[in-house]
Image: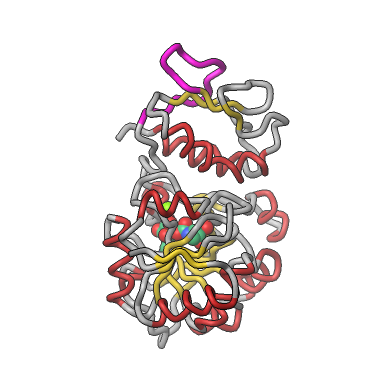
Amino acid sequence: MTEILCPDPAGNARAALLLQQGGLVALPTETVYGLGADARNSAAVARIYEAKGRPSFNPLIIHVADVAQARRYARWSDLAQNLADGFWPGPLTLVLPLTSHHGLSSLVTAGLDSVAIRVPAHPTARAILERFGGPVAAPSANPSGKISATTAAHVRNGLDGRIDAIVDDGPSAVGLESTIIGLTARHPLLLRAGGVSVEAIEARLGSALDSANGADIIAPGQLASHYAPHASVRLNATKAEPDEVMLGFADIAGDISLSTTGNLTEAAACLFDRLHELDALRKPIAVAPIPNHGLGRAINDRLRRAAAPR
Ligand code: TXA
Ligand code: MG
């Protein structure tokens, strides 16, 4: 049985208790819903992989309440501090070298000597993290390879009966996973485009980010086919073919639109929700062109993976 919890002190306390007991709890975050487990408990983390049907070589992001907690697990640097000052709490994940006494399950790090870590901004996520007091491993709360969950209903549709609880706190505001920056090499590396734009990070750093090339990629969000609806997806479409449903943007109306005014923040926030809606119709999906700047870059990344051959 999957419990549905309210985002109030009693619900948050119950969520923290379930995490302490090695349970799986879907948590609201500002990016997407995360499927959380105690990152120090291998049995609990193994259940994440089991519930999602996720290939087990993929490392997971850990979520903590603040920088002080992050420093227990990750070797800190001036660069990390600069980015944390600019974007934490918020939709940015930093990949940093592990500390020597981190105590994290090797299932979380997938045996790497680095850890991906973030301090989420969502008040309910923060309340639960503070109450729990430890690191929470949390990939997006959807079956592996499927569209990410941005509402409690999405989580329930994908994982009901497979997890202990869902904390229902409405739709995720950002709607895209966090941006991931690798800080283990000499230059900061963009590992995944996401909820903080590349332009904003480059402005903060005062320099351009390197991009991961194929060989470096250890991020499963980087698998070619990911975020996949049941039906096929056709990108950069200006109009729908007779059998298709269409996801519009700006001037291209479609059956439903990511943003009729061409607003990329609005489009990011509803992207996965619109894909879930169209997916329910079980027809091929045509998608209007999305400009490739700001959050458009992360939106196009997700759309390309949704459209990839599988
Ligand atoms: O917004 C988000 O980031 C959401 C919410 C729930 O916080 N979480 C999320 O987690 O998207 P997940 O597990 O779906 O994606 C984690 C990404 C993966 O692409 C993974 O490979 C990468 O982080 N990652 C984790 N540890 C890493 C490491 N040590 N080096 C490089 N990439 C790593
Ligand atoms: Mg995911």
Query: For the view shown, which residue lies furthest in the bottom direction?
Result: 101
Q: Is residue 278 above or below residue 124?
A: above
Q: Residue at x 42, y 29 (%)?
A: 281
| Chosen colour scheme | secondary structure
Q: Is residue 123 magenta?
A: no
Query: Where does the image place residue 128, in percent across and percent down from the top left?
Result: 54, 75
Query: Where does the image place residue 97, in percent across and percent down from the top left?
Result: 46, 74
* Predominant SS along the magenta part: loop
Q: Is residue 241 magenta?
A: yes
Q: Residue at x 60, y 52 (%)?
A: 195
Query: Where does the image place residue 205, in percent across and percent down from the top left?
Result: 68, 60
Q: Residue at x 52, y 20 (%)?
A: 237
* Closest to the observer, 163 or 137: 163
Magenta stretch: give its range. 231-245
Query: Where does the image place residue 123, in percent across and percent down from the top left?
Result: 64, 68
* Closest to the observer, 269 or 184: 269
Q: Quadrant of the N terminus?
A: bottom left
Answer with the quarter of the image where residue 229 lies. Answer: top left
Question: Can residue 76 be seen here?
Answer: no
Q: Is residue 277 above or below residue 206?
A: above
Q: Is residue 303 above or below residue 117?
A: above
Q: Residue at x 41, y 77 (%)?
A: 18
